[in-house]
Image: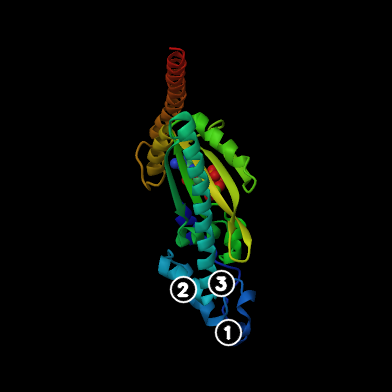
């Protein structure tokens, strides 16, 4: 769907109005003043040509080169990458503490990713925001993302609370799709954090998206994702209905697993007390 929208969307106010006589003047303008959707002269024509088709990684590279933003883009991506390292370390510290105190790992897996330049480009374009390094940082919150898979729902909230209580972490948005699932049945806890990265000369806050899910929720989301991105799908309505029903089953399963775990832990606690007394 996004690609469709991107193809039909007008690229810019000035697109197609290139006046070759103005090209010389445009090229005199300093790079900082160039609106990326108002490219100067012949460059505007070249970039306009690029934007009418599905953009590839090479095309994005050319746009960045032509608008003089290549280096700034690389630096920004490096900052996001560092922010991922920072958040991962925080999660790893919590993992070690919980593992030692509760004798189990709160996390099943942690996956991190940097959004691909093509996806960044498409997302801005879809929202009709000019593609520039400044706008990426200003408008996108999911360039750096982590997906944290836990076995149990209560671990998700205790990790969330621990992160929220850290001095240098700012939670700037929370979407609790566990307490309030999406109409299709999607469940996860989404946080947008701001975390500092410590550079040579400055401390810079970067935004990172965190998605917390149980194993069961993740299983559901991966199956649902497959369906969403299929172009033609037969019996779509009944599949959607089945997914919604399965999401409820998964929710029940998650809650039952929590009860089972608590009963096991209670047993362990009882055994420990008994062994201390005898
Ligand atoms: P986008 O970031 O543009 O997606 O919009 P948003 O910020 O309003 O979205 P939201 O925070 O609700 O979700 C962001 C991400 O969560 C998506 O990119 C997906 O990875 C995941 N997600 C959200 N809703 C669904 C869903 O219905 N199904 C699946 N499989 N994943 C979802
Ligand atoms: Mg988002």
51 sits to left or right of 223? right
Q: Residues within 10 Å of mark 1 (few under 14, many from 20)?
A: some
* Numbered disc 2: secondary structure: helix
Whether residue 8 is situated above or below residue 213 in the rendered picture: below
* Residue tagged 2: 62
Residue at mark 1 to residue at mark 2: CA–CA distance: 19 Å
Q: Ligand 1: does it lie within 8 Å of the C-beta at label 3?
A: no
Mark identifier at residue 15: 3
Residue 116 on image: x %, y %: 45, 59
Q: How many marks?
A: 3
Who comes first in sequence, dot 2 or dot 3? 3
Tell me the mark number nearer the camera, choosing from 3 and 1.
1
Residue 33 on image: x %, y %: 64, 75
* Numbered disc 1: secondary structure: helix
Mark identifier at residue 23: 1
Residue at the spot 46% in from the left edge and 73% down from the top edge? 62
Who comes first in sequence, dot 3 or dot 1? 3
Q: Residues within 10 Å of mark 2 (few under 14, many from 20)?
A: some
Given the current orientation, which residue lies at the most extreme front position? 278
Whether residue 223 is situated above or below residue 231 in the rendered picture: above
Residue 100 on image: x %, y %: 46, 34
Whether residue 14 is situated above or below residue 173 in the rendered picture: below
Residue 113 seen by the camera? yes
Tag 3 and tag 1, C-beta contact below 8 Å: no
Residue at the spot 55% in from the left edge and 33% down from the top edge? 157
Image quadrant of residue 24? bottom right
Whether residue 208 is situated above or below residue 12 in the rendered picture: above
Image quadrant of residue 234? top left
Residue at the spot 61% in from the left edge and 82% down from the top edge? 26
Q: Quadrant of the C terminus?
A: top left
């Amino acid at each position: 769907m996004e690609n469709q929208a991107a193809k039909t969307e007008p690229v810019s106010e000035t697109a197609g109005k290139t006046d070759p006589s103005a090209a010389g003047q445009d090229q005199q303008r300093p790079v900082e003043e160039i609106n990326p959707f108002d490219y100067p002269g012949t460059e505007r024509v070249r970039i306009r040509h690029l934007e009418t088709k599905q953009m590839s990684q090479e095309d994005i590279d050319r746009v960045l080169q032509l608008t003089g933003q290549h280096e700034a883009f690389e630096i920004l991506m490096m900052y996001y990458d560092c922010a991922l390292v920072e958040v991962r370390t925080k999660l790893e510290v919590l993992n070690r503490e919980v593992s030692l105190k509760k004798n189990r790992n709160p996390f099943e897996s942690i996956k991190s990713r940097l959004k691909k330049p093509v996806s960044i480009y498409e997302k801005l374009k879809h929202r009709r925001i000019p593609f520039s390094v400044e706008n990426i940082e200003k408008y996108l919150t999911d360039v750096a993302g982590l997906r944290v898979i836990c076995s149990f729902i209560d671990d998700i909230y205790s990790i969330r609370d621990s992160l929220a209580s850290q001095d240098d972490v700012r939670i700037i948005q929370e979407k609790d799709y566990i307490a309030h699932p999406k109409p299709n049945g999607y469940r996860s806890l989404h946080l947008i954090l701001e975390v500092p990265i410590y550079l040579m000369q400055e401390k810079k806050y970067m935004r990172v998206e965190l998605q917390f899910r149980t194993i069961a929720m993740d299983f559901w989301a991966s199956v649902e994702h497959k369906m969403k991105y299929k172009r033609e799908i037969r019996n779509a309505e009944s599949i959607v209905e089945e997914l919604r029903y399965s999401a409820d089953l998964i929710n029940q399963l998650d809650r039952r697993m929590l009860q089972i775990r608590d009963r096991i832990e209670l047993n362990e606690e009882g055994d420990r007390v008994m062994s201390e007394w005898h």
